[in-house]
């Protein structure tokens, strides 16, 4: 269920790639996406938020140009609703049969990961017919697709679809404290704070560890119920939560934080700065699941370059959970003037993935680049790292990526729900399949890098060394 609270969006009928969610959670809640068809990708984000979504505006979108055959698509605006519409037994069964058939006919793995897919049908059909309400029905649909156990495919209810569309457009508003956390041995370590959010205003800092929530140890998950410790931090606007915090120096204190609305852009999708005492730029691309993220990357780099040329650039995708493949390819095009990074292949079709030409930033031509990766680099972010590597535009430093690069096709259903189905697998130009293996770094640096500030981050230091002595 946690995957469905972390989302992504592709525009109507686009192909996407999705992944398992690493050991990171958010002191915020968000809901999942909308969709398109062609070699595009999307995935779940690795870091979650300690907030809960409020009422959403009606999302709208326009499909972007795609590589290879461009289907005719009409996007369907989805109005988020507070409650699920009732579905009769006949409609429930029709949706179930449609989803089951799509998996049977289009799933990338013809052995269905060892499942007897007909037996699954025979098990679920009577359960769907007997579902007492829409919520129970959608729970069964989640369970049905979860049986594929590929860490990619998923079913989204109409509410999930609406919330993900709003998230992609940047229109989703959260209620919470505005912090992202990663589970550690004694609690939840804060990794990012929303600028001007309640957590930051209460004096919390990245590196602080949440030991207790309202007096209950963070690690005592059973006492928090189904929502876990993250669910205990979330809550209505104006209410208060008491956190027991351990600072980096070991001191502990109780902090009362009042929950309030947090805009979805409080965690910027792209951040850039010059590393202190260097002419090296640091560019964090936190997602490819944000409208026009390639343009945001360009703007951030142009701003960075206003203060002078760069001797090197470090691109950090260590917590990038993926997103749209077309936006990822456009981003590669800022650094490499065209070139094929590989292909996605399915049962009956294949798409070559090519970066655009004529889009590079002239001040970066010839500037050495290092891309930082980790096990939390997923899907389109893995394809970005692989593409920069195979085009010889960047060295990779860090650890191997997640190995979750299957591409998902979205299928919109009659009730406004959506099936994201793994139908294609990504291959490098030489035919290598990185699913299950991940992108292999040129320089492996094992480190719990998220425990360190940027200035002392071991992988950033290794990247600086790689920029000083690039591998021929």
Image: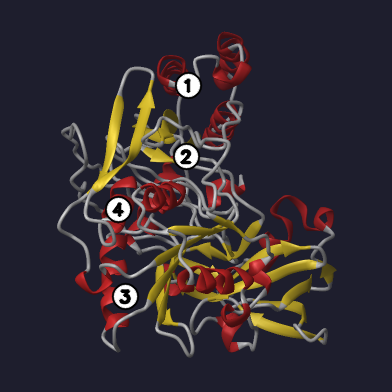
Instruction: Please state the horizontal and vertical placement of residue 259, each as a whole percent of the image.
Output: 59, 76
Query: Residue at (40%, 66%) from the top-left corner?
Result: 369
Does residue 37 appear anywhere in the picture?
no
Mark 4, other Cα within 10 Å: few <14 / some 14–19 / many ≥20? many
Residue 300: image tag? 3
Badge 1 marks a residue whose secondary structure is: helix
Name the residue carrying label 1.
Answer: 96
Q: Report which quarter residue 187 is drawn in.
A: bottom right
Which mark sits nearer the N-terminus, 1 or 4? 1
Earlier-in-chain disc, 3 versus 2: 3
SS assignment at label 3? helix
292 is higher (above) or lower (below) than 102: below
Q: Considering only order in the chain, which callout, 1 or 2, is on the residue closer to the N terminus?
A: 1
Q: CA distance from mark 1 to mark 4?
A: 32 Å
Residue lying furthest front = 472
The Cα atoms of the two marked residues, 2 and 1, are separated by: 26 Å
> Residue 142 location, x and y as percent?
56, 33
In this view of the protein, which residue sits in the foreground, 406 or 47? 406
Quick check: marks 3 and 4 in contact, CB under 8 Å? Answer: no
Which quarter of the rendered picture does the C terminus lie within? bottom left
Q: In the rendered view, would you say 263 is above or below 376?
A: below
Quadrant in which residue 447 is drawn: bottom right
Mark identifier at residue 405: 2
Q: Is residue 38 left or right of residue 123?
A: left
Determine whether label 1 and label 3 are within 8 Å by CB: no
Query: On the picture, is 404 further left or further right than 328?
Result: right
Between disc 1 and disc 3, the foreground one is 3
CB-based contact (under 8 Å), mark 2 and mark 1: no
Cα gap from disc 4 to disc 2, whole angstroms? 15 Å
Residue 22: x and y, percent?
62, 52
The residue at 70%/83% (across/down) is 256
Residue 327's disc is 4
């Amino acid at each position: 269920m946690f995957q469905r609270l972390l989302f992504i969006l592709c525009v109507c009928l686009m192909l996407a790639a999705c992944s398992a969610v690493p050991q990171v959670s958010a002191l915020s809640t968000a809901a999942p996406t909308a969709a398109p068809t062609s070699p595009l990708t999307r995935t779940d984000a690795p870091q979650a938020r300690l907030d809960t979504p409020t009422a959403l505006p009606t999302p709208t979108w326009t499909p972007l140009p795609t590589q290879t055959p461009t289907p005719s698509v009409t996007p369907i605006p989805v109005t988020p609703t507070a409650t699920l519409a009732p579905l009769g037994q006949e409609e429930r069964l029709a949706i179930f049969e449609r989803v089951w058939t799509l998996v049977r006919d289009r799933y990338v793995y013809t052995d269905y990961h060892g499942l007897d897919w007909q037996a699954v049908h025979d098990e679920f059909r009577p359960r769907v017919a007997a579902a007492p309400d829409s919520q129970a029905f959608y729970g069964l649909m989640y369970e049905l697709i979860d049986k594929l156990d590929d860490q990619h495919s998923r079913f989204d209810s109409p509410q999930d679809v609406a919330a993900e569309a709003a998230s992609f457009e940047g229109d989703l508003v959260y209620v919470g404290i505005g912090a992202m956390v990663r589970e550690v041995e004694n609690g939840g370590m804060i990794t990012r704070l929303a600028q001007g959010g309640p957590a930051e205003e209460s004096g919390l800092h990245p590196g602080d560890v949440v030991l207790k929530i309202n007096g209950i140890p963070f690690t005592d998950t059973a006492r928090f119920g189904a929502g876990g410790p993250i669910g205990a931090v979330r809550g209505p606007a104006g209410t208060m939560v008491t956190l027991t915090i351990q600072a980096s120096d070991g001191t502990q204190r109780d902090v009362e934080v009042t929950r309030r609305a947090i805009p979805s852009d409080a965690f910027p999708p792209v951040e850039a700065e010059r590393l202190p005492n260097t002419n090296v730029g640091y560019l964090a691309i936190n997602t490819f699941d944000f409208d026009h993220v390639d343009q945001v990357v360009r703007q951030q780099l142009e701003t960075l370059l206003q203060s002078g040329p760069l001797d090197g650039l470090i691109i950090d995708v260590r917590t990038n959970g993926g997103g749209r493949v077309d936006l990822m390819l456009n981003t590669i095009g800022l650094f490499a003037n065209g070139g094929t990074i590989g292909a996605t292949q399915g049962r009956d079709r294949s798409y070559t993935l090519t970066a655009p030409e004529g889009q590079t930033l002239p001040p970066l031509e010839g500037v050495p680049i290092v891309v930082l990766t980790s096990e939390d680099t997923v899907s389109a972010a893995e394809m970005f790292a692989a593409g920069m590597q195979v085009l010889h535009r960047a060295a990779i430093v860090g650890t191997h990526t997640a190995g979750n690069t299957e591409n998902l096709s979205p299928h919109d259903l009659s009730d406004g729900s959506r099936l994201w189905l793994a139908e294609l697998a990504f291959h490098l130009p030489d035919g290598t399949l990185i699913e299950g293996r991940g992108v292999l770094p040129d320089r492996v640096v094992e480190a719990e890098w998220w425990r360190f500030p940027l200035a002392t981050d071991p992988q950033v230091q290794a990247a600086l060394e790689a920029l000083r002595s690039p591998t021929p």
